[in-house]
Image (spheres, rainbow, N blue to C red):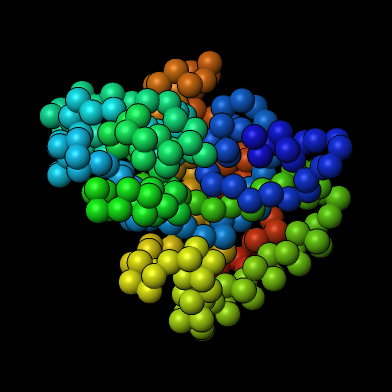
């Protein structure tokens, strides 16, 4: 876990990147980490369900009664549960199968499951693996992933100017990306080895912006509520996630980027 890696005495990490899920788990388990900033968000096609047509799946409703591979306790499972709620009781008979992210493409290809739920670029690789037999479903407006910079209170207190310099560099990169969108899109396409059309569709789902927004707190609370309801934690109350947000550095470097109510 990212929170544990930040605390390691040997080979220690001072700063790490992670989605909001490790932050949510850290709050529930009492790990003392801090979010320095959100550096980007992904919506729409960041997450997807890829299914096999030869299992009689043509629409999302056809997943009823089917075996769906998903990493339990992950944002992929949270996304799937949210999709199932939106689609209604007709798909409530989906049978979820615990599947590790590194195995998910192979499980779908081998037919061990009828469909999978995974984040980009995993779903794209799964599509490529089974070719024309793939049918893919997206959940627009269902889930937003927050990409964050994390550290520990100890490192931040001992290295305030280093944290400030990091934020200034990230904001500089944000401005460059905003001014050169086509160049960044080409980098995205080449890094993930995408065709131009897929890169165009997928890149549009990501926002590269340095922020600390109220929507992050709302997402953390929603996911913690889900985790408690599923019995993924022994905790019964939602933590105050504001305690895991380090505001001072970004307030100093770019106060307009902070919209968290505090």
167 vs 61, nearest the viewer: 61
133 displayed left or right of 125: left
* Quadrant hosting residue 94: top left
Q: Is residue 142 shown above or below 29?
A: below
User: Which residue is pictured at 24% across the width and 34% down the height?
Assistant: 84
Above or below residue 46? Residue 28 is above
Residue 80 visible from this viewpoint: no
On the image, the x and y values in percent for residue 37 come to 61, 56
Q: Nearer the viewer, residue 9 or 213?
A: 9
Q: Position of residue 153 (x, y in %)?
A: 76, 43
Describe residue 155's horizontal placement relative to residue 79 as left or right. Answer: right
Q: Is residue 142 above or below residue 4?
A: below
Q: Position of residue 42 (x, y in %)?
A: 43, 56
Horizontal side of residue 95 vs 203, given as left or right = left
Total number of numbered labels?
0
Q: Residue at x 42, y 52 (%)?
A: 125
Residue extending farthest to the front is 110
Q: Position of residue 100 (x, y in %)?
A: 49, 33
Q: Nearer the viewer, residue 116 or 251?
A: 116
For the N terminus, the quadrant is: top right
Give whichever of 24, 157 is nearer the camera: 24
Query: Is residue 69 in sight in this rendering?
Result: yes
What residue sits 39% from the left and 70% below the top? 195
């Amino acid at each position: 876990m990212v929170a544990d890696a930040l605390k390691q005495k040997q080979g220690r990490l001072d700063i790490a990147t992670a989605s909001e899920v490790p932050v949510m788990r850290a709050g529930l388990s009492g790990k003392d980490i801090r979010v320095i900033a959100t550096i980007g968000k992904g919506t729409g096609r960041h997450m997807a369900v890829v299914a096999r047509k030869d299992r009689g799946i043509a629409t999302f409703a056809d997943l009823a009664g089917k075996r769906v591979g998903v990493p339990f306790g992950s944002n992929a499972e949270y996304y799937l549960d949210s999709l199932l709620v939106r689609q209604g009781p007709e798909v409530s008979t989906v049978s979820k199968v615990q599947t590790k992210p590194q195995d998910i493409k192979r499980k779908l290809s081998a037919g061990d499951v009828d469909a999978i739920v995974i984040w980009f670029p995993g779903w794209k690789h799964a599509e490529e693996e089974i070719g024309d037999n793939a049918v893919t479903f997206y959940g627009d407006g269902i889930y937003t992933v927050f990409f964050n910079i994390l550290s520990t209170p100890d490192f931040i207190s001992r290295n305030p100017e280093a944290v400030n310099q990091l934020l200034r560099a990230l904001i500089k990169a944000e401005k460059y990306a905003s001014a050169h969108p086509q160049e960044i899109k080409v980098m995205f396409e080449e890094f993930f080895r995408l065709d131009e059309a897929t890169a165009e569709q997928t890149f549009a789902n990501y926002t590269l912006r340095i922020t600390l927004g109220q929507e992050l707190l709302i997402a953390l609370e929603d996911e913690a509520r889900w985790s408690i309801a599923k019995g993924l934690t022994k905790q019964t109350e939602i933590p105050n996630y504001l305690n895991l947000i380090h505001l001072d550095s970004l307030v100093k470097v770019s106060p307009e980027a902070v919209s968290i109510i505090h």
